[in-house]
Image (cartoon, rainbow, N blue to C red):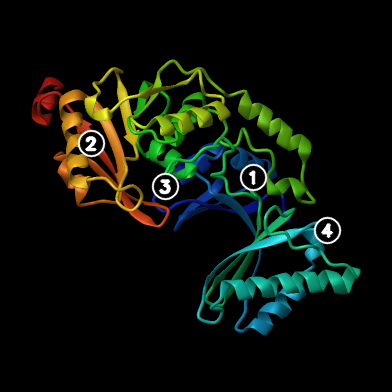
Amino acid sequence: MNTENLQIQIKTFFGLEQILAEEIKKLGGRNVEMKNRAVNCEGDLGFLYKINYSSRLALKILIPVMEFKAFNQHQFYDKLFKVEWEQFMDVEQSFAIDSTVNSETFKHSQFVTLKMKDAIVDYFQEKFKRRPNVEPKSPDIKFHLHIDRELVTISLDSSGDALFKRGYRKEQGEAPINEVLASGMLHLAGWDGKGNFLDPMCGSGTLLIEAAMIALDLPAQIFRKRFAFQNWKNYDADLFTKIKEVRIGRIKEFTGKIVGYDIDARMLNAAGTNIEAAEMEDVIELKKQNFFESKKELFPLLMVFNPPYDERISINDDDFYKKIGDTFKTHYPNTLAWLISSDLEAVKKIGLRPSRKIKLFNGKLETRFLQYEMYEGTKKVHKLENQ
């Protein structure tokens, strides 16, 4: 493996590709190229460690190591059996395979995953008279198999556990939002740690914690104990230590406020537990508060939230969204507010025209991330005053 010029593929959610590409450029990625739910780039081993440790928008980071065409399962197995697998792992190490298959030839991803596993195990058995163990839960080495029609790509997964697993979520609400999606929403909303932040329906606190991590410039994986690349043959422990030290040296002070409201005491307890696990008790303030009875207390203010919607929590959607709109209009003048929802009919009841709409997915649910700009008086008056 050429460690000076690695080809790297970084997976993310639909709708976050552009901001991930920007993040990767800032972190030093070369030849950055956007794909569907992914960004490709080039970089050295140090860069690979840095993006795993620092990227807020990456789900997993893959290094493609081989590509070939196969037109049937025998060809697939034969080509894999001929690979010198000891360049990627030792026989003592356990391994696992993730797969994504989009092919008429190879219809069942479990079957081709099994075939690949057989090829690797048979190779070691023939060459070293020993078999490596398959360990689905916490393997030493993780491979990613991607088949698009006849094209087979095998990658090394440098991350191991998906990168949304930040390590601070001890408690979950009824409808927790994925940490990478939460961070993506905050980036799209323009949160940079300047000013004040409010999540008026904070649930178990994910948006609050991600907002605080951005405000302090904390590395996204500061709590993670292990990455898959630490089991690779070329792992450079000193280099990784140095990268972590430099990154931690960039943590900054935050002078604004990050506040979360919820009316459910259980949710606030869950949020409190997660905030404590993230060591953010001094940065994030929680308040038992009905948003519909609240008034703007922080100036300037960015609001981002994930209100309950359809499939996840049952509420009277129309009435609920109308109340959101009324609260915006009467109690939050001169505020920028963003919310995510999959109930595209109910959001019309907010009674304000969103100034931006971004298509995102929360799990399998197609959603819209909507921006509302509240001015005192009308937009026209506001524009005249600012001329």
Q: Are marks 4 and 2 in contact (CB under 8 Å)?
A: no
Determine which residue is flagged by label 3: 18
Q: Would you call the spot at circle 3 few (<14 residues within 10 Å), some (14-19), or many (20 or more)?
A: some
Residue 74 in which image quadrant:
bottom right
Q: Which residue is mark 2?
A: 372
Horizontal and vertical percent for residue 213?
A: 50, 29
* Residue 253, position as x, y percentages in the image: 51, 17
Q: Is residue 78 above or below residue 245?
A: below
Residue 128 sits above or below residue 355 on the image: below
The residue that disc 4 covers is: 90
Q: Is residue 37 visible?
A: yes
- Residue flagged by tag 2: what amino acid is it? Tyr
Counting from the top left corner in percent of width and height, residue 57 is at 49, 43
- The amino acid beneath tag 1 is Leu
Decide which of tag 4 and tag 2 comes sooner along the chain: 4
Query: How far is disc 1 from disc 3 in space, using C-alphas?
Result: 19 Å
Q: Secondary structure at mark 3?
A: helix
Local crowd at mark 2 within 10 Å, few (<14), some, or many (≥20)? Answer: many
How far apart in space, not on screen, are marks 4 and 3 (Cα)?
Answer: 38 Å
Give whichever of 53, 181 is nearer the camera. Answer: 181
- Name the mark on residue 48: 1
- Crowd tier of the residue under label 1, counting other residues whose Cα lies within 10 Å: few below 14, some 14–19, many 20 or above: many
Give me the C-alpha separation between circle 4 and circle 1. 22 Å
